[in-house]
Amino acid sequence: MRKKMAKVDKEKDRLEQELQKYRSFYGDLDSPHPKGEAGGPPTTRESELKLRLRLVEEEANILGRKIVELEVENRGLRAELDDLRGEESSNVGLSRAEGGMGREQGSELSELRQQLQLVEDEAELLRRNLADVEEQNKRVTCELNKLRFKEGTRHTSGGNATGSASGAGDSSKAEALQEELKAARKQINELSGKVMQLQYENRVLLSNMQRYDLTSHLAITPRDSDAESDTGPGIGGRRGSDDDSSSSRLPPHRKREGPVGGESDSEEVRNARCLTPTRSLYSPESARLLSRSIRDRQQMIDIRAEAERLGRTIDRLIADTSTIIAEARVFVANGDLFGRMEDDDDGGRIREHELLYRINSQMKAFRKELQGFIDRLEVPKPEERDSEEPLSVSLARVCVSM
């Protein structure tokens, strides 16, 4: 607007100069005697010049009115600019200079607005690019899951031993897990049979030991019965009253010429007599039974350790199967979402998924059965093993104290 107004001012000055020149050369339009070349009778040239002069004056008047209108508009724009300056100075809290400073500030504001518009356009472009990249990433992820699943299916159908060993396909993993589950069931059945046999033999051994103990009590000699009545019914009582029983057997301060009452017996015979009233338990047959009982107990401990190891293996298999099922569900969900799953592979994938789920459920049930079997094993704890020492050791300690 300022440039236009300056241009109009220049045009006005030029036209005023030209009008003055025409007036000085031809005189006024209303004067009866024009000057210069226009003197004398009017000619065609004069009439033509007058017409041109009248047109120029009309144009000058029009331009003058336009100049007045532009000046009024310029005053209004300056008033608006002053108002804007006052508002900006009140908001920012800084005083701005008028004139050239106002023009500079206006140009700076326009530049800032342009920069802000460019930044907003760039941000919108970046948002669109980000949305496109996210959509592309989602498609690529779906394609990757689909390719992985197809690769595993191809390895399974081809019977590739290397692929099944490396765990590339879900079906090969499922077959391996099923084979391991069968082997584990077979092993647990064998262990269960062994445990039942050992428990039966343990009960037989206990009944035999009780029968032998009863027989030994019935076969006690009168001398042994007197010694047992002095020593008491238990092993602890026998330990406490051994000295009294031995002193009661010997007559007090009697002189004798030869050995009486087994004094001539050897040390081994006396040690053997210390084992009453259960001396018959420690025959070769009873020693064999005791060693067999200890061996059976050790076998029970080994069976429990093997069952616990098998339980840990089954836990790992359950965890791997659960991971495979979760990956398969994610793949199926992505395939259904984008509608890219092939129709001929739907039935096979569903069957494989159901097979994995069924194997996982069977392994969990088998793990519960195995835990119940481990809990039913009658294996003594370390402190119970120390307390349940063989009877021969207790009787040997009694004889040593005697």
Image (tube, rainbow, N blue to C red):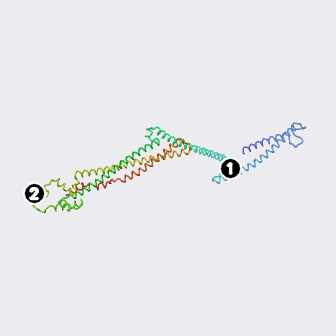
Q: Report whether 148 appears left or right of 39.
A: left
Q: Quadrant of the C terminus?
A: bottom left
Determine whether label 2 and label 1 are within 8 Å by CB. Answer: no
Mark 2 residue element = loop
Identify the secondary structure beneath mark 1: loop
Left or right: residue 131 versus residue 191 is: right
**Which tag is nearer the camera, tag 2 or tag 1?**
2
Per the image, the residue denoted by label 2 is 258
Q: Which residue is mark 1?
A: 98
Please state the horizontal and vertical placement of residue 393, each as a whole percent of the image. 24, 54
> Label 2 to label 1, Cα distance in Å?
151 Å
- Residue type at mark 1 is Glu
* Crowd class of label 1 (few under 14; some 14 to 19; many from 20; radius 10 Å): few
Report the number of numbered marks. 2
Q: Amino acid at mark 2?
A: Gly
In the picture as drawn, the residue positioned furthest to the right comes out as 41
Which residue: 69% across, 48% down? 99
Of mark 2 and mark 1, the one earlier in the sequence is: 1
Give the camera-side residue of 105 and 353.
353
Q: Which mark is residue 59?
A: none
Residue 196 falls left or right of residue 251: right
Q: Quadrant of residue 20?
A: top right
Q: What residue appears at the point 40 percent right and 45 percent down from the top-left corner? A: 182
Horizontal and vertical percent position of residue 375: 37, 53
Farthest residue in the left direction?
257
Q: Where in the figure is residue 245, as x and y percent of width and height?
A: 18, 61
Residue occupying image coordinates x 10% and y 57%: 258
Q: Quadrant of residue 275?
A: bottom left
Q: Nearer the viewer, residue 230 or 119?
A: 230
